[in-house]
Image (tube, rainbow, N blue to C red):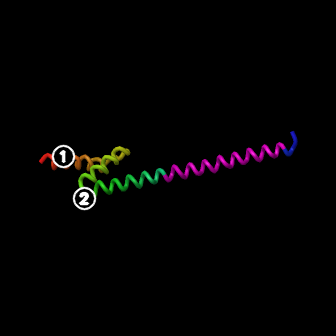
């Protein structure tokens, strides 16, 4: 095995490593953007749920999605109250 052949293998290995690093960085950026997108979506759902100007059915639909995505806390408690309010209004 000559020095040129060893150099060729070293170059190929370096290229594979560089490609792996680039793909890894791109994946991390993608995951970060995905996380931010979910956070933004959850924020929009929270705003919809608490907005009294929105129709009750829209607020409940947003609450369904919010809870399905793991939303909890005061917003979930408000969502449950909205469901009760909707049921009371529709019994009449």
Main SS, magenta region, reads helix
Q: Are marks 1 and 2 in contact (CB under 8 Å)?
A: no
At x 48%, y 51%, the residue is 34
Q: Residue furthest bottom?
A: 53
Q: Residue furthest left?
A: 92
Give the magenta range: 5-33
Q: Mark 1 or mark 2, which is nearer to you?
A: 1
User: Where is residue 40 drawn, in percent x and y?
Assistant: 41, 55
Give the quadrant of the N terminus: top right
For residue 87, the mark is 1
Q: Give the SS element for disc 2.
A: loop
Q: Give the SS element for disc 1.
A: helix
| Magenta-colored stretch includes residue 8 | yes
User: Where is residue 86 drawn, in percent x and y?
Assistant: 20, 49
For residue 9, the mark is none
At x 24%, y 56%, the residue is 55
Pick the front one: 48 or 75: 48
Residue density around tag 1, few if under 14, some if 14–19, many if 20 or more, within 10 Å: few
Image check: 50 left or right of 34? left
User: Where is residue 50 drawn, in percent x and y?
Assistant: 28, 56
Q: In this figure, what is the number of numbered marks?
A: 2
| Magenta-colored stretch includes residue 89 | no
At x 42%, y 53%, the residue is 39
What residue would you read off at disc 2?
A: 52
At x 23%, y 50%, the residue is 82
Give the mark nearest the N terminus, 1 or 2.
2
Cα–Cα span, label 1 and label 2: 17 Å
């Amino acid at each position: 095995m000559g020095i040129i052949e060893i150099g060729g293998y070293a170059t190929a290995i370096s290229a594979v490593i560089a490609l792996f690093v680039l793909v890894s960085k791109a994946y991390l950026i993608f995951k970060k953007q995905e996380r931010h997108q979910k956070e933004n979506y959850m924020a929009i759902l929270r705003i919809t749920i608490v907005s009294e100007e929105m129709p009750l059915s829209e607020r409940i639909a947003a609450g369904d999605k919010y809870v399905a995505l793991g939303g909890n806390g005061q917003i979930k408690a408000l969502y449950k109250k909205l469901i009760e309010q909707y049921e009371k209004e529709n019994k009449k």
